[in-house]
Image: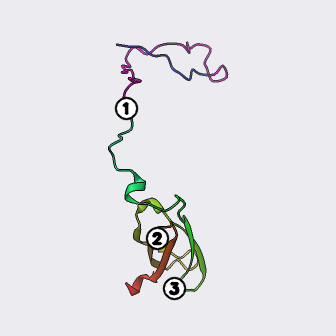
Amino acid sequence: MMRFRDPWPAQPDDADDDEETDEVADDVEMEPIDPDEELIDDDAPQLDESFPLGDGVADDSAVVYCPYCGEPNEIALDPGSGSQQTYVEDCQVCCQPWQVIVHYLPDGSAAVTVLAADET
């Protein structure tokens, strides 16, 4: 069994005068990390291969107009969720639900369509 010291010992302001701050716990077993072990799987598919976005810059927000009240809303987009997405989001002004349809183009720009939830 290997013993390890706490890498973040209590600071003088935090330590009780009655307690020893450099004690080693007897009941904790930890296995050492092999520094030669590969932590990244090079054979795993990379995001760029499955979802290329041109120069790597993709739209991460868009301004859309609520189909109910007509007010503009800025919404966040998630380019990592795929090139075509459909989800429901509520208007920030009137709270009515919309269906948001996002289609990412090869250059990373997003075409965003918003429909009233009762139109779908």
Q: Amino acid at mark 2?
A: Leu
Residue at image location 37% in from the left, 32% down from the top: 38
Is residue 40 found left or right of 75 in the rendered image? left
The magenta stretch spans residue 13: yes
| Residue 18 pos. (x, y %) | 58, 13
Q: Mark 1 and mark 2: span between their CA atoms?
A: 35 Å
Q: Residue furthest left?
A: 43
- Which residue is identified by label 1? 38
In this rendering, is residue 113 above or below 50? below
Per the image, is 117 magenta? no
User: Which label sits in the foreground, 3 or 1?
Assistant: 1
Which residue is depicted at the point 33% across and 46% down? 44
* Residue 64 on image: x %, y %: 56, 78
Residue 92 is left or right of residue 31, and the answer is: right
Query: Mark 2 falls on what kind of element?
Result: loop
The residue closer to the viewer here, 81 or 28, is 81
In the rendered image, which residue does mark 2 sit on? 105
Please state which amino acid type lies under the numbered disc 1: Glu
